[in-house]
Image (tube, rainbow, N blue to C red):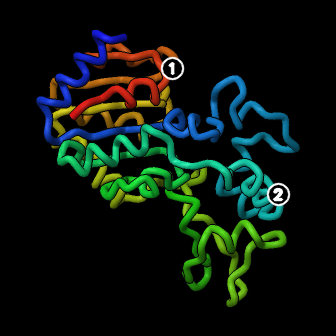
Amino acid sequence: MSDKIDRLNSMISESSRIVFFGGAGVSTESGIPDFRSADGIYMMNYKYPPEEIVSRSFFEEHPKEFYEFYKKYFYYPDAKPNISHYRLAELEKAGKLSAVITQNIDGFHSQAGSKTVYELHGSIHRNYCMRCHKSYPLEYVINSDSIPLCECGGTVKPDVVLFEESLDSDTITGAVNAIAEADMLIVAGTSLKVYPAAGFIRYFKGTRSVLINRDETDMDDYFTLVFHDKLGDVMSKIKF
C-alpha cells in the first residue's frame, strides 16, 4: 500500500480545494454498524423490516415502534469520532479541505472539529416539534419514555431524512457546488449505491479522485486511485 499512499500524499500536496464524500464506512470504525453489509442494521430480524421502519409512513403510522427501533439502533452513546474524522478536520484547518459531505447522521465530523459539513441525511443531534418547530437536543428524545412530545403536545421528530422524504435543498446545493469546485475528491466508506447522494460525485470535473472502501464498488473504474483497505489505516498515513 506504500506506493498508493505516496501517490495519495502527492495528490493532496497538489490540491487546495479537496472535498471528502463519506458514507457509513467512515463511522463503522467508531463502533457504529452500517446498514447494508452482512451484519448491518438492514440485515437484522425484527418485528418489521428495518427499511420499512425508517420510512416516513411508518413513522406516522407507528411512532411508538419507530422510536423503539430508533433509540436502540441509531444512538450509540459510547461511540466517538475516530482518526479519520480528526484527520479531515486537520486537513480543513490546514487550508487543504474545503468541505465534508456525509451520509451519516452521527455528527462526528463536527464533533471532531470540521466546520464546513454537509449532512445529506440530517443529524440525530437536531430534533424539532412537528407542530410548533421548537428545537430539542438528542438527550430529550433518547430519555423520553416512549414517543417524545413537545410542551405544545406535538411529536418531536429527529432531523434525519427517512425513506419517502426528500433531501434538504440547501444542503444539496452546497454539496453539489463544493464538488463542482473541488480540485480533488476523496470518496470513502460507501458502496455508492444510495441515490440521489451517490450521483453527486458526477459533478466532479477534476483529475484527482480517490476511492477508499473496504469492498469493491461498481464505480471503482471512475476513480484515479482506489484503496480496498480500512479507512483509518489510509487516513493515518496522509501528510500535508
Residue placed at 78% from the left, 40% from the top? 49
**For the residue marked with disc 1, what is the amino acid?**
Arg
Number of numbered discs visible in the structure rendering: 2
Labels 2 and 1 touching (C-beta < 8 A): no
If the image is split into quadrants, where does the N terminus sit?
A: top left
Question: Is residue 177 among the parts visible in the rendering?
Answer: no
Vertical order, 9 against 72 (above or below)? above
Q: From the viewer's perspective, is 49 left or right of 235?
A: right
The CA span between labels 2 and 1 is 33 Å
Q: Considering the numbered disc 2 on the image, is that residue within a helix, a strand or a loop?
A: helix
Q: Which residue is mark 1?
A: 214
Instruction: Tell me the quarter of the picture where residue 29 sits.
Output: top right
First in sequence: mark 2 vs mark 1: 2
Q: Position of residue 139 (x, y in %)?
A: 67, 70
Q: Considering the numbered disc 1 on the image, is that residue within a helix, a strand or a loop?
A: loop
Foreground pick, 61 / 116: 116
Residue placed at 63% from the left, 41% from the top? 32
**For the residue marked with disc 2, what is the amino acid?**
Glu
